[in-house]
Amino acid sequence: MKDAEWLAKLLRCGLIESNFVPPEDIRDLRDLTRYRKKLIHHRTSEQNRIHKILQDANIKLTSDLSDIFGVSGRRILEAILNGEKIETDGRRVCTGNLKAK
């Protein structure tokens, strides 16, 4: 109670500054930035989940691809989903360079 009285007294004397409230366009930009960060987090979570499922199925794409969600990785994943046979070097469905062994 004493703290509240002390704060009220300081406010009456003008010794407490008001909070900064940014303009509406800045607040909207901050909201969009937070939402984008959340979407990126969800995308990363799903990519990690897919990577774990592939690892559990003994499909080790990361030994040949640096990014399994790049163009070549997505083509290989799409070929797997379509039931196509993937050659052991994976070059039939790849467009870019694979890791050198």
Image (tube, rainbow, N blue to C red):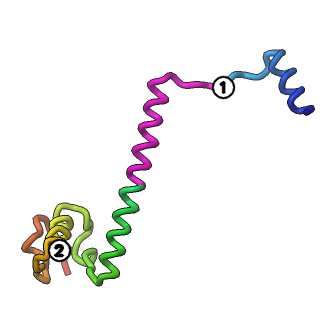
Where does residue 100 sit, x and y in percent of width and height?
19, 77
Residue 33 lies in the magenta stretch: yes
- Classify 53 as above or below 31: below
Q: Is residue 80 left or right of residue 56?
A: left
Q: On the image, which quarter does residue 99 sit in?
A: bottom left
Residue 39 lies in the magenta stretch: yes
Query: What is the magenta range?
Result: 19-41
Q: Which residue: 30% across, 76% down?
A: 54
| Amino acid bearing label 2 | Ile
Where does residue 52 sit, x and y in percent of width and height?
36, 74
Q: Which residue: 43% across, 40% down?
A: 33
Q: Which mark is residue 3?
A: none
- Classify 86 as above or below 96: below
Where does residue 64 sit, x and y in percent of width and height?
22, 76
Q: Which mark is residue 19?
A: 1
Number of other residues with Cα within 10 Å of mark 1, as a class: few under 14, some 14 to 19, many 20 or more: few
Q: Nearer the viewer, residue 19 or 52?
A: 52
Q: Which residue: 40% across, 62% down?
A: 45
Q: Which residue: 37% across, 68% down?
A: 49
Q: Which residue is mark 2?
A: 80
Q: On the image, which quarter does residue 12 sit in?
A: top right
Which element carries disc 1, helix, strand or loop? loop
Number of other residues with Cα within 10 Å of mark 2, as a class: few under 14, some 14 to 19, many 20 or more: few
**Between discs 2 and 1, the one toward the N terminus:** 1
| Amino acid bearing label 1 | Asn
